[in-house]
Amino acid sequence: MKSCISFVGLLAVGNCNRILKSNTGGNIIQNNLKERNSYSNHPAIQIRGGESSSTEINLSASATMASLFAGSVGGAIGVGVSYPFDTLSTKAQVKSGKDEIQLSLIRSMARIWKSEGIRGFFEGVLVTMVGQAFIKAIQFAVNEITFLWLEKHSTIQSNIIKMAIAGTLAGLLSSFVVTPVELLKIRMQSQNKLSANKKDDDASPQSYDNELDCARSIVKNEGWNALLFHGLGITIVREIPSFAFYFVAYGLLAKSAMADALGGNAAPLVFGAMAGWAMWIPTYPIDIVKTIVQVQTRERGKEKELLSSRQITAKMYRAGGIRAFFDGLEPKLARAAVKHAVTFWVYEVLMGLLRPSN
């Protein structure tokens, strides 16, 4: 409940500061704090201590609330701005492994525009934007709490391993919110394709007026269990490695010399895009299977059996080989870059306004 989100940025930057503290001592942290525009200066974390004393991390409650707000807004805006790319990716994914010719990105855009207009690019955007606010809040809280607990109670020395563990747990727990949000998103995005292809065994002729209508239809025809848990297993399989890759990638980038070279304005844009790619490229084949799992429908009382993730994977491979698992990758990567870059930029702007004065 699967990305570089404002909350993710907050955590990764904070984790990066801890890496610097652990590996090079308090002086570097002190120097970063003196440079208010330095990218590694975390607005929600106050670091106290000097050369002769141990560095102590103190989380300000007001600053943490500010970061939650900034992250929610940044995440929602990032999703909205990049949503057309997500729609293009989903429409390509639902055709994977079938005897259909995949359209190019430009032709797919032209087809949507001709048949549905601008609205066709934003089907399901509302529930996704609202859902992302909750998802990022969960991911932020779980990641931060887990990392701090590991620092205090575990014997693990590597901050990279601790970031990976924290990201893994964040991905696991947030999957329970991601599943229903993305189920509605996928059904909304793919409904026109499904409606036009009534001969498809996996398709449903059902069309929806809006996200609420979609949710009502799922509950009526498939039950509450389908709305809340349809595709949960494959979602967990995707989210766990995604956020492990993300936190490690962003932490390493924030620690690199690129952070100083880019500065506080450009670094969130560049690192957000790069970390988004880092989390999506290795997990995209899982995402495409998840999409096909969730797009399947079955009315209550009917004997129709839904294909499992394993059956879908085998069917896709037989029909299109390895290449079938990367249909729609281009718009997904474009979406990841735009979404996470915008999310980070909005986050930094809002934190500049909300940051408690020292």
Image (spheres, rainbow, N blue to C red):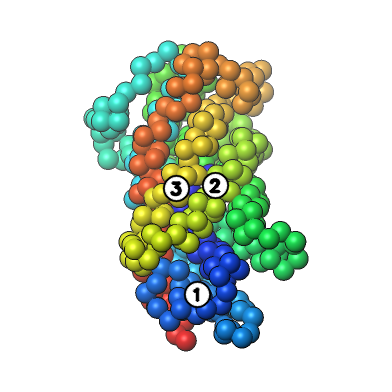
Indicate the secondary structure of the residue bearing disc 1.
helix
Q: Say if 286 sits above or below 303 in the image.
A: below
Which dot, 1 or 3, sits closer to the camera?
Answer: 1
Give the spatial CA distance, label 1 vs label 3.
28 Å
Indicate the secondary structure of the residue bearing disc 2.
helix
Q: Say if 154 sits above or below 62 in the image.
A: above
Query: Nearest the camera: 220 or 259?
Result: 259
Identify the mark at residue 245; answer none if there is no mark.
2
Q: Is residue 192 left or right of residue 220?
A: left
Q: Is residue 237 left or right of residue 124?
A: right
Identify residue for label 3.
276
Q: Which of the marked residues, 2 or 3, is nearer the chain's N terminus?
A: 2
Is residue 217 something that shows in the picture?
Answer: no
Give the spatial CA distance, label 1 vs label 2.
26 Å
Q: Are marks 1 and 2 in contact (CB under 8 Å)?
A: no
Residue 18 image point, x, y percent? 58, 68
Residue type (three-letter) at the residue carrying disc 1: Ile
Which dot, 2 or 3, sits closer to the camera?
Answer: 2
Residue type (three-letter) at the residue carrying disc 2: Phe
Is residue 258 something that shows in the picture?
Answer: yes
Residue 214 image point, x, y percent? 49, 38
Residue 138 image point, x, y percent? 59, 57
Indicate the secondary structure of the residue bearing disc 3.
helix
Q: Is residue 66 left or right of residue 233?
A: left
Q: Are marks 2 and 3 in contact (CB under 8 Å)?
A: no
Q: Which residue lies at the image location 33% right of the left edge and 62% below the top edge?
A: 262
Identify the mark at residue 28; answer none if there is no mark.
1
Query: Nearest the camera: 233 or 187?
Result: 233
Q: Which residue lies at the image location 64% right of the left edge and 80% below the top edge?
A: 54
Q: Alpha-carbon neighbours of circle 3 within 10 Å: few (<14), some, or many (≥20)?
A: many
Residue type (three-letter) at the residue carrying disc 3: Gly
